[in-house]
Image (cartoon, rainbow, N blue to C red):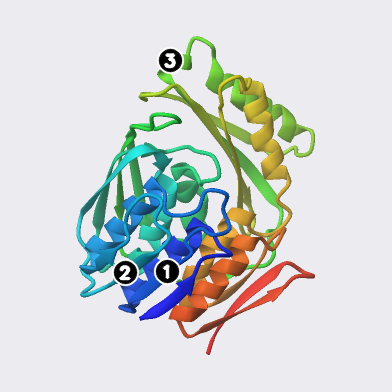
């Protein structure tokens, strides 16, 4: 059994490790889970994702409880099948999907993932929309991911009702070192139906567009939606389409935070990305690059990138090379 130490890492380390364990058949024990976080141990959304991965490979799992700092994950036979993921909090669906989409590398037929509860938008987590509009299109696999959100989930109650269908996809060599010229920007602004009278979604989009127009003269399109939800909330995603890449920046509404501030923050997050891929895509692309090979340039080498590289190398015959001066990461077979 492989022993992995999470004392210097967060939840992504656990998600990546369990996903790679599921598809490689290598048993693991993770100690000091989320040791780098103020609140250590497993959280609700980690549990849902790990349990779902376990269903895909018939894993024997111990230590799967909130606050647990140790986990054993012993995979048996990998077999793709439709699964349901229950998240009792506003825990991020995007983070659960992060793990399941790594396992989807092994899918040979379409798999339906049903989410009951959880958040489609949340702090320190990718919106589900980001995976659909940025990550999978970056890999040229956008047609393999179909997202149907019947009810969005916001903090504090979550309560999402969503279904994701993942079709088998073929990984291609990932080469994202130059983004090229900016062609257009798409703004996706979402708010719960209870905020419609206050024009929250429109105000978010207008503020983001105003900020973006200070720097760019390309076409900017806004997609504004009011959605059913258990808790009131909002979110906005800015996606820049370049000649050779896509970059994203997002923000979420919070109590006492004006819609204009949310939109402006999303635009500024987008504008802060200077690489060919943004900092969030960068660490999420790594498991796929481990299989297909590739190189990307990003704006900053984050701790997530470093820890994700280290855990992937323990499972797969790959070596990541990180150039901190140029902020370039490459994957090569060993």
Disc 3 packing (10 Å; few <14; some 14–19; many ≥20) = some
Q: Look at mark 3 in the image and give the residue it sits on.
A: 194
Q: Is residue 99 above or below residue 153?
A: below
Which residue lies at the image location 66% right of the left edge and 47% below the top edge? 183
Mark 3 vs mark 2, CA separation in Å: 42 Å
Mark 1 vs mark 3: in front: 1
Which residue lies at the image location 30% right of the left edge and 78% below the top edge? 25
Position of residue 202 in the picture relative to residue 27 (left or right): right
Disc 2 secondary structure class: strand
Q: Is residue 283 above or below residue 21?
A: above
Q: Position of residue 328 (x, y in %)?
A: 69, 70
Q: Position of residue 291 (x, y in %)?
A: 45, 77
Q: Look at mark 2 in the image and give the residue it sits on.
A: 73
Q: Does residue 278 appear anywhere in the picture?
A: no
Marked residue nearer the N-terminal end (1 or 2):
1
Q: Position of residue 20 (x, y in %)?
A: 39, 71
Mark 1 vs mark 3, CA separation in Å: 43 Å
Position of residue 216 in the picture relative to residue 208 (left or right): right
Q: Quadrant of the N terminus?
A: bottom left
- The answer to whether mark 1 and mark 2 are in CB contact below 8 A is yes
Along the line of sight, the residue nearer the viewer: 125 or 236 = 125
Disc 3 secondary structure class: helix
Mark 3 vs mark 2: in front: 2
Q: Does residue 14 appear anywhere in the picture?
A: yes
Along the line of sight, the residue nearer the viewer: 122 or 194 = 122
Q: Look at mark 1 in the image and give the residue it sits on.
A: 30
């Amino acid at each position: 059994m492989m022993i992995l130490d999470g004392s210097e890492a967060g939840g992504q380390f656990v998600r990546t490790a369990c996903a790679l364990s599921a598809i490689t058949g290598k048993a693991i024990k993770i100690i000091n889970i989320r040791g780098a976080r103020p609140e250590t141990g497993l959280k609700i959304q980690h549990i849902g994702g790990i349990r779902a991965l376990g269903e895909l490979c018939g894993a024997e799992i111990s230590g799967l409880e909130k606050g647990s700092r140790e986990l054993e994950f012993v995979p048996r036979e990998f077999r793709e099948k439709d699964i349901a993921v229950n998240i009792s909090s506003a825990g991020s669906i995007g983070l659960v999907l992060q793990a399941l989409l790594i396992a989807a590398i092994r899918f040979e037929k379409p798999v339906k993932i049903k989410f009951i509860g959880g958040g489609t938008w949340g702090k320190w987590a990718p919106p589900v929309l980001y995976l659909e509009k940025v990550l999978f299109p970056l890999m040229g696999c956008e047609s393999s991911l179909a997202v149907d959100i019947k009810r969005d989930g916001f903090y504090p109650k979550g309560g999402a009702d969503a279904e994701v269908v993942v079709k088998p996809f073929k990984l291609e060599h990932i080469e994202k070192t130059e983004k090229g010229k900016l062609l257009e920007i798409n703004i996706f602004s979402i708010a719960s139906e209870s905020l419609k009278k206050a024009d929250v979604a429109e105000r978010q989009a207008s503020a983001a567009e105003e900020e973006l127009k200070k720097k760019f003269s390309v076409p900017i399109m806004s997609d504004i939606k009011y959605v059913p939800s258990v808790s009131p909330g909002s979110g906005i995603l800015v996606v820049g389409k370049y000649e050779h890449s896509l970059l994203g920046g997002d923000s979420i509404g919070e109590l006492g935070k004006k819609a204009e501030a949310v939109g402006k923050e999303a635009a500024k997050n987008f504008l802060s990305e200077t690489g060919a891929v943004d900092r969030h895509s960068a660490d999420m692309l790594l498991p796929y690059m481990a299989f297909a090979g590739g190189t990307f340039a990003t704006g900053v080498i984050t701790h997530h990138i470093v820890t994700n590289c280290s855990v992937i190398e323990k499972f797969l015959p790959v070596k990541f090379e990180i150039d901190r001066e140029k902020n370039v990461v490459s994957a090569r077979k060993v």
